[in-house]
Amino acid sequence: MVRSLHFLAVLLTVCAVLFGGAARADDTTPGYLEFTEISEGRYSVLWRSPKLSTPLPALALQLPGAARNLTEPVTTEMPRSIVERRLIEVDPAQFLGSRIEIAGLRESRTDVLVRIAFANRAATTTLLQPSQPWMIVKGPRSAAQVTWDYTVLGFEHILEGFDHLLFVLALLLIVGPTRRLLWAITSFTLAHSLTLAAATLGLVWVPGPPVEAIIALSILFLAGELLKVKRNKPSLTATYPWLVAFTFGLLHGLGFAGALADIGLPEHEIPLALLMFNVGVELGQLTFVLSVLAVVFLLKKLFRDWPNWAEQLPAYFIGSTASFWVIERVSGFSSRLCALRSTLSALRSFTSRKCCAIDECPVWAS
């Protein structure tokens, strides 16, 4: 069964190399639309549209026909999204039962979470998907709907996160389908639940790009550990899988928190939404592990044996994929630092020309 597991890992990691690195993560980043009633019939509208790949049409918000702009839309471009704010007015009797649609969502691979907060502090949330890119405005929805929406978001996020799945796969290859794997997965779950909650509630904050780079490094570390196991050398992960899983789970939880920050949390249902997003992540993770084991069972029936050198291929494929992600992510935030440095240099030059000699400029002297 172990050889079948390694054969499957080759297939999975090849797919990750071919498709995981090339695909833009922004294509699956959910959008967020929020209506906040500030007075009767007047709503502040926040529309965060994720940037999609060039061939895909940009997502466009289509407001109810009865709505009219009190202020013109103000657009702010962010690294991974475009944020639009405006103030609208609509007859309350016409708003309920009206239709809101996201044009272009049907052709994309992302979702849009819509939240409507009324003046009486009641709120409703709806998840728009490519299969149904529109909604009919209704009154406040039940806690059961919030539960379902955020469970689906968490489930989709983990299954679309190649890096998190590759980490779990590497852990599975090192430990094997044993009871020790159960303890390792439990430790990983506990760790990323702690940091996900802490980061989402604002107790800790770590910049996203460095976290993503370190997550890639954690996968690279497990690839090296997997090679040690295949070469019968001492391995920290093989000896203490729960400790390694817990340590790196803390980092992966910060990555989950970044995704949840992009989605947004309903103001009055934060504990429930946070809990159900985490439940969705765990359901997706469990689905992945069970699917791997099921396919392994089928491969065991089809393939009896293959060369011994093939057993080391998964480690090299996982390591190569993780190395690519490390370089890509480090270069990404390095380029941002360079851009910031260039901006500061330009400002310094401008200030020196406007004031006096740079050493005498009161701005820089202070």
Image (cartoon, grey):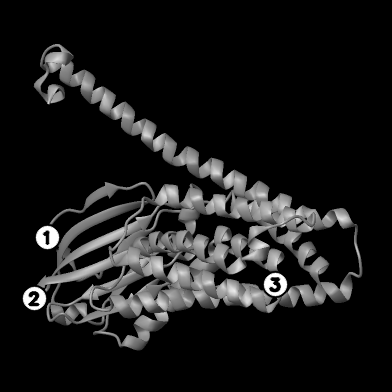
Give the residue drawn at x 67%, y 47%.
320
**Residue type marked 2:** Glu
Q: Is residue 273 above or below residue 366?
A: below
> Which residue is disc 1 drawn over?
70
Give the residue drawn at x 36%, y 69%.
197
> Which residue is disc 3 drawn over?
292
Q: Is residue 103 visible?
A: no
**Category of crowding for the residue at label 3, using alpha-carbon neighbours closer than 10 angstroms: few (below 14), some (14–19), many (at least 20):** some
Q: CA distance from mark 3 to mark 2?
A: 53 Å
Q: Quadrant of the N terminus?
A: bottom right
> Which residue is disc 2 drawn over?
40
* Residue 219 position by quadrant: bottom right
Label 3 SS: helix
Percent x, y of residue 259: 41, 61
Disc nearest the viewer among 3 and 2: 3
**Residue type marked 3:** Val
* Residue 64 position by quadrant: bottom left
Percent x, y of residue 36: 18, 70
Choose between 319 and 174: the one closer to the eye. Answer: 174
Disc nearest the viewer among 2 and 1: 2
Percent x, y of residue 52: 45, 52
Q: Is residue 188 above or below residue 307?
A: below
Q: Is residue 350 above or below residue 115?
A: above
Q: Residue furthest top?
A: 357
Choose between 174 and 74: the one closer to the eye. Answer: 174
